[in-house]
Amino acid sequence: MAGSTFGTLFRVTTWGESHGKALGVTIDGCPAGIELCEEDIQKELDRRKPGSNPYGTKRNESDTAQILSGVFEGRTTGTPITIIVYNADHHSADYSNIAERYRPGHADFGFDAKYGFRDYRGGGRSSGRETLCRTAAGAVAKKFISRLGIDVAAYTVSIGNIEIDREKADLTKRFDNPLIMPDNSAAERAEEYLKKIMSEGDSAGGVAECIISGVPAGIGEPVFDKLDAELGKALFSLGAVKGVEIGAGFGASKLKGSENNDPFRNENGKIVKLSNNAGGILGGISDGSDIVIRAAFKPTPSISLKQLTVNKNGENDEITIKGRHDPIIVPRAVVVVESMCALVIADMLLRSMTSDINKIERFFN
């Protein structure tokens, strides 16, 4: 299977299956000398692990990270970093009834069409459990970019049609509720909504937003590898993401140029923008303001309601999905969104180091 590696200079390769022995990630290109320990990885994994909130799967996994290579005496060595997490609570028998049937909304049919074979236990490589590998890699990327004063913070904007009030939102309060919403009033309404759909055996979608602050101007490539294109690719690589917006996003299409353009000013010797409809990126290159990006997650496709489907023989059939599934993905996905954004920024920072001869001369001289 191709396509399990992401990045150019800061490269990550994830491996393992939802119900296999273990999952993990190898990170190549991380600079030496960064302080890193298993606790740094674990605190990020704990944010997305099963059971981290009452609206997630009841699968009981500790998701304990072990660093196998690339770290010595508490610092990265510059060699590949490999992190492994062993599976413990996989109930493969829960999936026996889907071995011959395709689950609506899942990758089952596509996998069979591509490979002629699939791991039906929890979806194998297409399972959301693969995101623990990205989260572990993101923890390393965050340690790297934090040395440069860059911070990545994501949160839930909406669940179903319940959205935060941005005028009341307080990002410092986003962890005060299990839905990671920076508006406790909206979170309460969303929890009531989730309890209702859970009682009906259904699921919900939502939107996560991420703010990347401290990125200097000049990061990104101007043509195919635009910074916004790389961020979009990173978030679209998450299985449940069906839409990505940056800055004003689709809303920009409703504005006039005079409304959408962000005016520049020089304030105390620093070039700043008076608004941020561009979301921190112009022409594929960072402009020094906060990068603001949103990802829309579809409802969890694994629901307990009876659904129409077909089997491997192409015959019409019905399916009722068993097992332990998230009625809403977004709260556990928030840290994954942060991780993917951090991986892109880490990679693009390294790539940008060679874009100017003056930067190269300063480094070597």
Image (cartoon, rainbow, N blue to C red):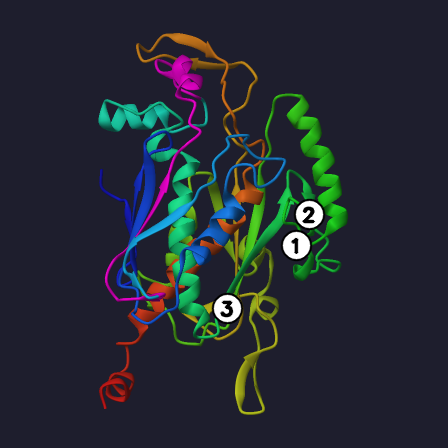
Q: Could you say where residue 188 lies in the image, as x and y percent from the top left? A: 75, 42
Q: Residues within 10 Å of mark 3 (few under 14, many from 20)?
A: many
- Dot 2 falls on a residue whose secondary structure is loop
Q: Residues within 10 Å of mark 1 (few under 14, many from 20)?
A: some
Quadrant holding the C terminus: bottom left
Is residue 16 on the magenta stretch?
Answer: no
Q: Could you say where residue 12 lies in the image, as x and y percent from the top left? A: 30, 53
List the residue tagged with mark 3. Answer: 280
List the residue tagged with mark 1. Answer: 174
Give the spatial CA distance, label 1 vs label 3: 22 Å
Give the spatial CA distance, label 3 vs label 2: 29 Å
Quadrant holding the N terminus: top left
**Is residue 31 among the parts visible in the rendering?**
yes
Q: Can you say whether 359 is above or below 104 in the image?
A: below
336 or 309: nearer the viewer: 336
- Sequence-wise, the earlier of marks 3 and 2 is 2
Contact between labelled residues 1 and 2, with CB atoms less than 8 Å apart:
yes
Q: Which mark is residue 177?
A: 2
Name the amino acid, label 3.
Answer: Gly
Q: Residue at x 45, y 22 (%)?
A: 104
- Dot 1 falls on a residue whose secondary structure is helix
> Depth-wise, is mark 3 or mark 2 nearer the camera?
2
- Dot 3 falls on a residue whose secondary structure is loop
**Is residue 283 among the parts visible in the rendering?**
no
Q: Which mark is residue 5?
A: none
What are the residue bounds of the magenta stretch? 74-103
Residue extending furthest toward the front: 73
Q: Could you say where residue 204 lies in the image, as x and y percent from the top left? A: 60, 33
